[in-house]
């Protein structure tokens, strides 16, 4: 490793689950940030919801199933500006986005690619997996009984010497999804994971992400800087039983708070747990009480400074925990006019059409699936 004075300042962020479109906005916002002189690189470690992404060299023919099949399986499809062809992202995989300014003496994209590969090779070696490079196929590979299989993929985009996109390292993703595509455009080689190689002794994604971050610091000559932890919020989908089925409360935020429709959302107070915050926010924003249940969804996103003003320009992130609350239909709704200007009780499709953000729509989808069977009782 180089001495600290010659290393590149960087902020390294572990963000957990990030919805893919939110990840694209995150990358673009941070690319603008690091392009300005004196700003540290941003190294993001995260996981995505199930998606197929098509690089610049991919075609729809690289995906062997229909759009209807993908929708039924809960896998979305996105075209991107990164290099390469089609790949899969999903739970159990560590995705790293190195948002780096390579201007000046660092103007060597090949060096960055080799460094990303080396960090993955060293992470695999931490668990006694012997990974290696194949020169004509970027990424890292492992010899298996079926022949060489890819353990980690690389796909970058470079614009004005600012990098976006990055690497995907397979810890324990659903490998069956790779059978639906021609992974990275290579028809004669398979895909593996740490779990497929090691079984129960494989690390979990968080353990692998921590190891990978340490190796990235070493091989990319980074000087890690402290960074502000994500703020924390709750999303409490508030609903009641209506004559035509479930009705979801949607409220329009005031213009100074973004002017978008949502159900109940709000920030955690110091020392507050998410469940307590959800109860408090529903009561403060609506005057309603009900039965709160978790949706099993926690996700993170970049906070766009164009929507919310901050006293400094350090990037902000937020982690949101999602719940739903059923309320009795005869309760009086008391809207807080400082936050919301109007409200509607909507069917699930109507609520989805009003929602702006991926996390809210995903939470609504989970609620809809839960309500698709027998409705839970209030007690």
Image (spheres, helix red, strand yellow):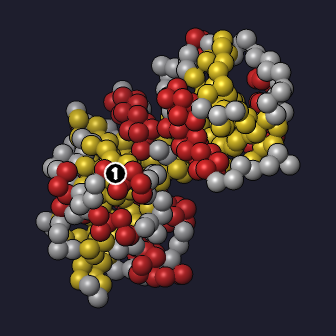
Residue at 51% over, 64% down: 205
Whether residue 48 appears in this view of the structure is yes
Taking the view exactly as shown, the residue that stands out farthest to the bottom is 145
Q: Is 199 positioned to the left or the right of 29 in the image?
A: right
In this rendering, the count of numbered labels is 1
- Compared with 160, 90 (above or below) is below
Residue 315 position in % (x across, y down): 51, 32
Q: Is residue 239 above or below residue 92?
A: above
Judging depth in this view, the residue of 140 and 41 nearest the camera is 140
Question: Which of the 4 quarters of the picture holds residue 124?
Answer: bottom left
Q: Between 239 and 170, which is closer to the camera in this rendering?
A: 239
The N terminus sits in image quarter: bottom left
Q: Which residue corresponds to mark 1?
A: 68
Local secondary structure at mark 1: helix
Residue furthest front in the image = 243
Residue at 23% from the left image edge and 48% from the top image edge: 55
User: Is 168 rendered above or below residue 292?
Assistant: below
285 left or right of 154? Answer: right
- Residue at 39% x, 50% y is 71
Left or right placement of residue 93 versus residue 334 in this view: left
At horizontal 20% and vertical 54% (from top left) the residue drawn is 85
Viewer-nearest residue: 156 or 81: 81
* 199 to the left or right of 77: right
In this view of the protein, which residue sits in the foreground, 243 or 71?
243
On the image, the x and y values in percent for residue 163 come to: 29, 41
Quarter-of-image position of residue 73: bottom left
Establish if 87 lies above or below 375: below
Residue 250, image x, y percentages = 63, 25
Instruction: Estimate how packed mark 1 is, as few (under 14), some (14 to 19) or many (20 or more) residues with alpha carbons within 10 Å.
Output: few
Q: Is residue 118 visible?
A: no
Residue 241 on image: x %, y %: 73, 36
């Amino acid at each position: 490793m180089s001495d600290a004075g010659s290393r590149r300042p960087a902020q390294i962020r572990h963000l957990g689950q990030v919805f893919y479109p939110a990840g694209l906005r995150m990358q673009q916002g941070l690319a603008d940030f690091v392009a300005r002189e004196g700003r540290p690189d941003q190294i993001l470690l995260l996981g995505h919801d199930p998606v197929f992404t098509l690089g610049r060299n991919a075609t729809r023919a690289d995906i062997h199933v229909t759009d209807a099949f993908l929708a039924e399986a809960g896998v979305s499809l996105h075209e991107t500006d990164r290099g390469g062809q089609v790949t899969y992202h999903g739970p159990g995989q560590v995705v790293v986005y190195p948002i780096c300014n390579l201007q000046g003496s660092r103007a060597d994209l090949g060096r960055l690619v080799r460094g990303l590969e080396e960090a993955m090779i060293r992470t695999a070696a931490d668990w006694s997996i012997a990974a290696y490079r194949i020169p004509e196929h970027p990424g890292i590979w492992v010899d298996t009984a079926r022949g060489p299989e890819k353990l980690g993929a690389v796909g970058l985009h470079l614009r004005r010497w600012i990098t976006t996109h990055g690497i995907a390292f397979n810890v324990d993703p659903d490998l069956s999804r790779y059978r639906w595509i021609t992974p990275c455009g290579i028809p004669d080689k398979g895909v593996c994971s740490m779990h497929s190689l090691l079984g129960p002794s494989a690390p979990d994604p968080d353990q692998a992400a921590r190891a990978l971050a340490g190796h990235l610091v070493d091989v990319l000559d980074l000087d890690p800087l402290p960074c502000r932890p994500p703020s924390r919020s709750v999303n409490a989908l508030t609903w009641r039983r209506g004559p035509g089925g479930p009705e979801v409360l949607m409220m329009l935020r005031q213009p100074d708070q973004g002017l978008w429709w949502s159900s109940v959302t709000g920030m955690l107070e110091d020392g507050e747990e998410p469940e307590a915050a959800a109860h408090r926010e529903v009561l403060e924003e609506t005057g309603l009480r009900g039965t709160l249940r978790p949706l099993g969804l926690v996700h993170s996103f970049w906070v766009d400074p164009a929507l919310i003003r901050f006293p400094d320009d350090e990037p902000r992130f937020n982690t949101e925990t999602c719940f739903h609350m059923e309320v009795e239909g005869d309760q009086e709704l008391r809207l807080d006019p400082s936050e919301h200007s109007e409200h509607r009780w909507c069917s699930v499709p109507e609520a989805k059409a009003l929602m702006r953000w991926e996390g809210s729509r995903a939470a609504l989808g989970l609620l809809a699936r839960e309500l698709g069977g027998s409705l839970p009782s209030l007690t």
